[in-house]
Every structure is written in structure tokens, then in C-alpha cells.
Image (cartoon, rainbow, N blue to C red):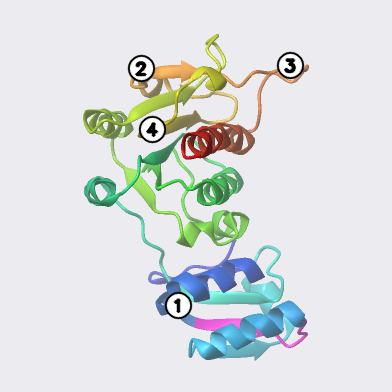
């Protein structure tokens, strides 16, 4: 992981830093880049110069000592990323000009899985990702690196009471489908054309009981081989792109 002070954190990786420059350059305090450059780092340096960001050229060993991970020759010191709350989410949903698509991650504690889910959420047009404040991975440097920039483009909403948040979403006309193995209903049997939220549970344990009870319906991903379940980030991708497929058909 990267080192974090009280008010700043270090993010690393070429794509992560490039996205940060593009979407949230005001957060960047400075960028450290290896003296051993390449074409991708040269492009990043040009972006940083255009954004008037301070750049420190350092030996690769200095980056190795600062970052615990594959930094790819660059890291950025920046102010802490923003986590949104339920009040922000309500306002955000009111402003949408299309049926909402939300992703609820219940008990996903592995930052690699969180990062992968954020990346898929960004690619599939998710409007916000909702996680519980407790029992969940946070926006660590590892999660941001795996998200490959999506952590700064997808709103992440951390809520104190996930069941209460789900009830409020339902009151606002959002239909919640929970992914679960024990139901015979397939995700391909669901109509995702309206405002929907997908609730995905942790790998192994799945959705917690209370979260499951607050879903409008449960659906399973058909499994035809010997493997009984999918990694949560893979399952999230399968489910989200079924929503994308249906909406594309309905819009043609």
C-alpha cells in the first residue's frame, strides 16, 4: 500500500495517475516520476505540465521505498478522495435524466475486488456504487490501482445502515435485485429496463441475511460447469452487462 498522512495519500500507476490528472487535477499536490522514462511516462509528464502540476523526477529506488506495489514509475501525492453519503445520493438520483443503475456491494472487504467492481461499474454506466461504512473495503491505494482510474469517475457512497438505504431506494422507485445462488430465477429472466440496483455479496458468504431480505427479488447466474460460484467482481460484470444488453435493445 502507499503511505498516507492525515490529509494526503499517495496513488500510483500510470493509468490511475493519468485519470486523476484528467478528472481531479485539483487534488494533486505533486507527482513523482522515475528518471527512467518511457513513452507512456512521457505522455503523462506532458499532461501534468499542461495541468500545471509540480513534478519531481526521482530514482526508481525512491519510488520503491515510497510505494508497496507496482507503481509503473509514477505516483501522485493528493488530497483524500471523496466518499459520498445518503443525502448526496438522494440529490444525485433526482438529477438523473435516465433510469438509475446502481451497484450495491455488501461485505466486499478485498480491495482488489472493490477496485475491479468500480472499474466494471464505470465501463457499464453505473450511476453510483453503494457500500456499508463498516465491513467493507475502502478506497485504498490498492483499490484505486485496480480500478485503473474508475475510483475517481464513479461516485462511491458509504452508508451507515445499508438496509435502511435500500428501503429508501425502493421508496424512490428503484427495484433491487440481489445476486444469490439458491434461487431458480436467472438474471436473464429479469426485466432491467427501469430504475434498478444490483446487490452483490462477498465471495463465499454472499449477501448478508438482512440485505437479502431487503431485495425485491433474487436472481442467480446460471452455472454449467463444475465451479459453483464466481468471484464477486466477475459476477458483478456478468450482471451489469445483462442490464446494459437489455437497455441497448430497448433503445434501438
- Disc 2 or 1, which lies upstream in sequence? 1
Whether 36 is among the magenta residues is yes
Figure disc tally: 4
- Disc 3 or 2, which lies upstream in sequence? 2
Q: Which residues are magenta?
A: 30-38
Horizontally, residue 122 falls left or right of residue 1, namely left
Label 4 CA crowd tier, 10 Å (few <14, some 14–19, many 20+) = many
- Viewer-nearest residue: 124 or 120: 124
- Viewer-nearest residue: 93 or 49: 93
Q: Are marks 2 and 1 in contact (CB under 8 Å)?
A: no
> Tag on residue 196?
4
Q: Quote the CA–CA distance across marks 4 and 3.
A: 27 Å
| Residue 35 on image: x %, y % | 73, 88
Q: Nearer the viewer, mark 3 or mark 1?
A: 3
> Badge 2 is on which residue?
213
Quick check: can you spot residue 13? Answer: no
| Residue 22 on image: x %, y % | 50, 74
Q: Quote the CA–CA distance across marks 1 and 4.
A: 32 Å
> Badge 1 is on which residue?
25
Tell me which residue sits at (45%, 77%) in the image.
25
> Badge 3 is on which residue?
224
Q: Quadrant of the N terminus?
A: bottom right
Whether 26 is among the magenta residues is no
- Disc 1 or 4, which lies upstream in sequence? 1
Q: Quote the CA–CA distance across marks 3 and 1.
A: 46 Å
Amino acid at each position: 500500500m502507499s503511505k498516507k498522512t492525515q490529509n494526503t495519500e499517495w496513488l500510483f500507476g500510470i493509468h490511475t495517475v493519468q485519470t486523476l490528472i484528467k478528472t481531479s487535477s485539483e487534488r494533486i499536490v505533486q507527482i513523482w516520476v522515475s528518471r527512467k522514462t518511457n513513452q507512456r511516462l512521457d505522455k503523462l509528464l506532458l499532461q501534468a505540465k499542461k495541468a500545471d502540476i509540480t513534478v519531481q523526477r526521482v530514482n526508481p529506488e525512491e519510488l520503491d521505498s515510497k510505494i508497496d506495489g507496482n507503481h509503473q514509475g509514477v505516483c501522485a501525492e493528493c488530497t483524500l478522495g471523496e466518499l459520498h453519503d445518503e443525502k448526496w445520493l438522494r440529490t444525485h438520483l433526482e438529477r438523473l435524466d435516465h433510469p438509475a443503475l446502481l451497484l450495491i456491494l455488501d461485505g466486499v472487504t478485498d480491495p482488489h475486488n472493490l477496485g475491479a467492481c468500480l472499474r466494471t461499474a464505470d465501463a457499464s454506466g453505473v450511476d453510483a456504487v453503494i457500500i456499508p461504512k463498516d465491513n467493507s473495503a475502502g478506497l485504498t491505494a490498492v483499490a484505486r490501482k485496480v480500478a485503473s482510474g474508475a475510483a475517481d469517475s464513479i461516485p462511491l457512497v458509504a452508508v451507515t445502515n445499508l438496509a435502511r438505504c435500500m428501503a429508501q431506494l425502493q421508496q424512490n422507485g428503484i427495484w433491487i435485485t440481489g445476486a444469490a445462488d439458491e434461487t431458480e430465477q436467472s438474471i436473464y429472466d429479469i426485466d432491467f429496463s427501469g430504475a434498478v440496483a444490483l446487490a452483490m455479496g462477498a465471495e463465499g458468504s454472499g449477501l448478508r441475511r438482512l440485505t437479502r431480505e431487503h431485495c425485491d427479488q433474487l436472481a442467480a447466474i446460471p452455472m454449467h460447469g463444475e465451479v459453483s460460484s464466481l468471484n464477486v467482481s466477475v459476477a458483478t460484470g456478468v450482471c451489469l452487462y445483462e442490464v446494459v444488453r437489455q437497455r441497448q435493445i430497448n433503445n434501438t
